[in-house]
Image (cartoon, coloured by chain):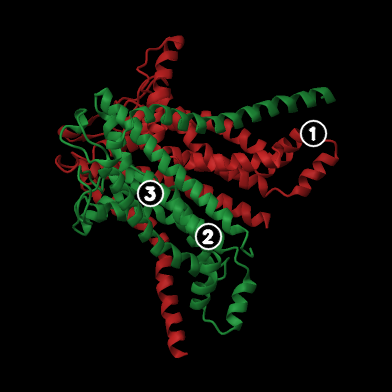
Amino acid sequence: MVKRLLKDLLARRAMFLFTAVPGVLVFLMFFGLYDRSRSILALHSFPDLLFGSSWFPLKGQFGLYPFLMGTVWVTLAAMILAVPISLLSAIYLSEYAPRRIRETIKPVVDLLAGIPSVVFGVWGVLMIVPLVAKIAPAFGAYSTGYSVLAGAIVLAIMVFPTIIHVSLEVFASVPRALREASLSLGATKWETVKHVVLRKGLAGIIASVALGFSRAFGETMAVLMVVGNTPIIPKSPFDSAYPLPALLANNYGEMMSIPLYDGALMLAALVLLLIVLVFNIGARAVLIKAERKAE
Amino acid sequence: MGFRQRKAEEMVFKVLMIGSTVIVTGSLLLIIGTVVVKGFPAMNLAMITQTPKGGYYLGKEGGILNAIVGSLELAGGATLLALLFSLPIVLYINLYKRRKSRLAVFTRFALDVLWGIPSIVYGAFGFILMMRIGLRTSLLAGIIAVALLELPIMARAMDEVVRLVPHSLQDASASLGATKLETALHVVTRQCLPGIITAILIAFGRGIGDAASVLYTAGFSDRIPGALLQPAATLPLAIFFQLGTPYPEVQERAYASAAILTLIILVISLLSRWYGRKFQKNSIL
């Protein structure tokens, strides 16, 4: 008997230690990346690095601004495409679709979420890049197809599942009685959606968009393969860009052979982590609050 | 607004909604369709039975067996490691603590935040960790990075199932004199087994498909990794490298490799879905 209790006690202690891992890991990642980027932060100030626009590692110039803008452009363009489509689909699935259709489409969305980003990249190269090259002249621009727009289209599809999944949960948490009250007052279904469901779920919807944004912001391989990777600030959707994650993925090879290069790349990773953390923590906090309110 | 106008607005939005849903569903079919149509003609037996011979990336003989096996070993190892951490975490926050306790809420929050961290950052962090403990790019370093990436995915998926176990089941077990540990291992884990296996499969699928986290850590090699400290090729990176060559015949192989990877992912997804459903019937949840 004592042995069994002892085992239970030991297990309890050990499991508590394991449970500390996720929380500690977030901090560990932050401090690890910070520690490795100290070499470069000692020589240049953080704003100089973040907003400097010349990137010549061999001359010791590490301005991250073009890459930051590359990420921001691609991500924003992707969100413009993804948000309306995802939200409209989520509303349809949650409010309008017959059960059978909903139960068929949900697994498809899950499947979409499971497709590896390299496969998205291959598909982008095969289909989206040539398409963008073809339509660019219609807008009076020349493009190789490897562009912000190509990256945005591929990314948009990649964030569909995130936004749809989270907003479906948000819609499901709106009480049925509220909808019934609205319908019984003579509102049409769409008016009920517009004035009741969307209004009630607004905070959650914003959170779902923020989660989609941060997912898009850090996406690496798929974007890298279709976006062109030239370190200039893009001026139109048909220009190529060089996002921050692509910078990290392309240069791990020479990182250790050029002084300060590894510090600059780790700083880039740190910036990426910080931006994603802000969006994630904000969105999750909103969702937890909304969930509590619903109970 | 008149009734007709209100109805018209409803119709317009309904059309938009159905259109959007078609776009979402259609894009999945389009992606899988394109990769399969482009990939299968380039596929041959040598691709999945041979390692790259000299000059493979110039269009010569060989296959990507090194990457297929490398990916399976890497994702397998990472999934095992992630399981070793996820299971205790999930059991602890659901059984030892009240489900709404501060620790449980905080841990879920931390897992969700971890879930949102991009895989390239896991790669960079894995790299730092690897330098700290004196490893080189190797299968082991890749396993560690991918395990960290898989941890939140697996733990959250498991948590969704374990938190549904009724309290009465735990009480029944306790009233028979079982300790919490015995309840956790013999009652709860068994009860949730299908959910746990589904979580494992989901995490495995994510692990095998991820490229950015192994870029920094696993290296690349034309040989099948035989030990933990050897560098390992992975399927996503093999696709990436083959597509990056200027030779059309090698690019064709990238399409074929992408088709193989997609196939693996589809099988895993369907397996986890089928498995989850099969056991749902026997469950008392």
Query: What is the distance, in whole Å, between disc 1 and disc 2 at their CAs?
Result: 42 Å
Q: How crowded is mark 2: few (under 14 residues within 10 Å), some or many (20 or more)?
A: many
At x 62%, y 52%, the residue is A290
Q: Which chain carries label 3?
A: B
Q: In this view, does B146 lie to the left or right of A86?
A: left
Q: Residues within 10 Å of mark 3 (few under 14, many from 20)?
A: many
Q: Which residue lies furthest to the bottom in this view?
A: A2
Disc 1 marks which residue? A188
Where does residue B96 sit, x and y in percent of width and height? 52, 73
Type of residue at label 3? Gly
User: According to the rendering, which colour does chain A have?
Assistant: red
Where does residue A42 sit, x and y in percent of width and height? 21, 46
Query: What is the distance, in whole Å, between disc 1 and disc 3 at their CAs?
Result: 46 Å
Type of residue at label 2? Pro
Viewer-nearest residue: A74 or B63: B63
Disc 2 marks which residue? B194
Q: Check residue B207 in the rendering and tell me which mark sits there, or answer none.
A: 3
At x 32%, y 47%, the residue is B71
Type of residue at label 1? Thr
